[in-house]
């Protein structure tokens, strides 16, 4: 018992007073090192901000090639490094031809400009993002034409801008996700400082066309009274698993206190935003080809959405209704009724039937930058 109590006493408190005093001096030096480190990260951030415009020019050319607005010249296609597609030996070329015939992209008309499904292919190649995508998201993501990064000098943070071509699902041509960052040791826990970190994010409202909202589903609840045996049916709209829940993250209250579930969702969301900003946007073509995936090691066990089990039926999307559904449910329970649920419909009229678990928006402390408002480009 004494040993257990001994282990609970902080080591520093057991030191002789003269040594404890010197340790305090070392801690003060450590705090000064952390503040200097924070200054270093802020200077690096400013340098990155200065280079952002130059990178953006290259990314704009990438967008033009992907969307078929620019056909690269022969000179543009010469890499000047080994591993180019024209370097294949005859035997390799034959094997490649066989494999290519099995890919869906090989069935696309060769005369079609650009690179079809460029961003959707990237998302499906990356496990972290693929886990978020449901079958009903894929037709929408085929309209994703570009992802841009906007960095704001002060305060620290960045905006991810997702550009879409005109589509039947929503009227927006640009969806945004804003991330705010900080770069200073926490007064209450300075030793945990590791550099700039995301601490807040904000999505945007998607203007869905009628019956096209894939982020909600309508369930039909049959309620049977325990004593009378009478059955009634009500409709209730609930959240549906979808990649597009990414644009509706949990909101953090002013006091910054959240429960464990919300914190897990935010941690995942921050990680995804950081990954898109640090990995996907700068190296998009390598994620499209899969070359950037060799050293990837991400946990794909988290899931986005409520994970509830339901049977889904094709049909029109039933829009949100009845703000007092929860009250009705409470009343029903008081009356002694059992609830039997089935899904009447979910989201998109053109959706593919069936669901798989997506990934929750998770967040972790990352080194980043800040955003600006979304403008049509």
Image (spheres, rainbow, N blue to C red):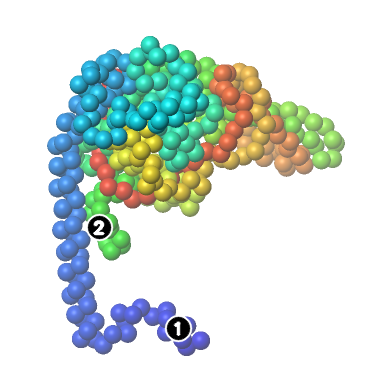
Q: Which residue is mark 2?
A: 185
Q: Is residue 288 visible?
A: no
Along the polypeptide, which appears first: circle 1 or circle 2? 1
Q: Which mark is residue 5?
A: 1
Residue at 46%, 49% (x, y): give it. Answer: 299
Marks 1 and 2 close (CB-CB < 8 Å)? no
User: In terms of depth relative to the viewer, which is nearer, 109 or 19?
Assistant: 109
Q: Which mark is residue 373?
A: none
Place of residue 334 in the rendered image (x, y in percent of width and height, measured from the top left): 73, 42
- Secondary structure of the residue carrying numbered label 2: loop
Residue at 14%, 37% (x, y): give it. Answer: 50
Disc 1 versus disc 2: distance between alpha carbons?
A: 32 Å
- Circle 2 residues within 10 Å: few <14, some 14–19, many ≥20: some
Left or right of residue 216, residue 223 in this image: right
Place of residue 242 in the rendered image (x, y in percent of width and height, measured from the top left): 51, 32
Place of residue 305 in the rendered image (x, y in percent of width and height, measured from the top left): 53, 38
User: In terms of depth relative to the viewer, which is nearer, 258 or 110?
Assistant: 110
Place of residue 80 in the rendered image (x, y in percent of width and height, measured from the top left): 21, 31
Q: Is residue 212 visible?
A: yes
Q: Quadrant of residue 154?
A: top left
Q: How many marks?
A: 2
- Secondary structure of the residue carrying numbered label 1: helix
| Residue at the right extreme of this rendering | 228
User: Is residue 71 depicted above or below 8 in this figure?
Assistant: above
Quadrant that contains the C terminus? top left
Left or right of residue 40, residue 101 in this image: right
User: Is residue 210 depicted above or below 120 in this figure?
Assistant: above
Residue at 43%, 47% (x, y): give it. Answer: 298
Left or right of residue 229, residue 7 in this image: left
């Amino acid at each position: 018992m004494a040993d257990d109590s001994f282990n609970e006493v902080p080591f520093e408190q057991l030191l002789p007073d003269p040594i404890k005093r010197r340790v305090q001096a070392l801690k003060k030096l450590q705090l000064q090192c952390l503040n200097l480190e924070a200054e270093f990260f802020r200077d690096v951030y400013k340098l990155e901000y200065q280079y952002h415009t130059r990178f953006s020019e290259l990314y704009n050319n990438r967008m033009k090639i992907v969307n078929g607005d620019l056909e690269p010249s022969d000179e543009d296609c010469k890499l000047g490094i080994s591993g180019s597609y024209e370097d294949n030996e005859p035997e390799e070329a034959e094997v490649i031809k066989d494999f290519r015939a099995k890919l869906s992209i090989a069935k696309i008309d060769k005369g079609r400009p650009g690179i079809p499904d460029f961003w959707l292919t990237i998302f499906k190649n990356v496990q972290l993002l693929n886990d978020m995508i449901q079958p009903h998201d894929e037709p929408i993501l085929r309209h994703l034409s570009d992802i841009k990064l906007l960095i704001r000098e002060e305060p620290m943070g960045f905006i991810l801008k997702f550009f879409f071509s005109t589509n039947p699902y929503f009227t927006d041509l640009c969806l945004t996700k804003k991330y705010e960052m900080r770069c200073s040791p926490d007064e209450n826990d300075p030793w945990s400082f590791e550099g700039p970190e995301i601490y807040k994010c904000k999505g945007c409202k998607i203007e869905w066309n009628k019956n096209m909202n894939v982020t909600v589903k309508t369930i039909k609840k049959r309620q049977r009274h325990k004593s009378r045996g009478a059955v009634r049916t009500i409709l209730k709209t609930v959240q549906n698993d979808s990649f597009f829940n990414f644009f509706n993250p949990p909101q953090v209250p002013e006091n910054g206190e959240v429960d464990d579930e919300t914190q897990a969702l935010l941690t995942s969301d921050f990680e995804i935003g950081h990954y898109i900003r640090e990995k996907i946007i700068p190296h998009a073509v390598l994620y499209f080809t899969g070359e950037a995936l060799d050293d990837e090691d991400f946990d794909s066990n988290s899931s986005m959405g409520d994970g509830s089990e339901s049977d889904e039926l094709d049909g029109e999307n039933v829009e949100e209704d009845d703000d007092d559904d929860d009250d009705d449910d409470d009343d029903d329970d008081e009356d002694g009724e059992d609830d039997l649920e089935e899904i009447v419909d979910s989201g998109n009229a053109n959706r593919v039937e069936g669901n798989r678990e997506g990934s929750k928006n998770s967040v972790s402390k990352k080194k980043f930058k800040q955003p600006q408002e979304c403008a049509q480009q």
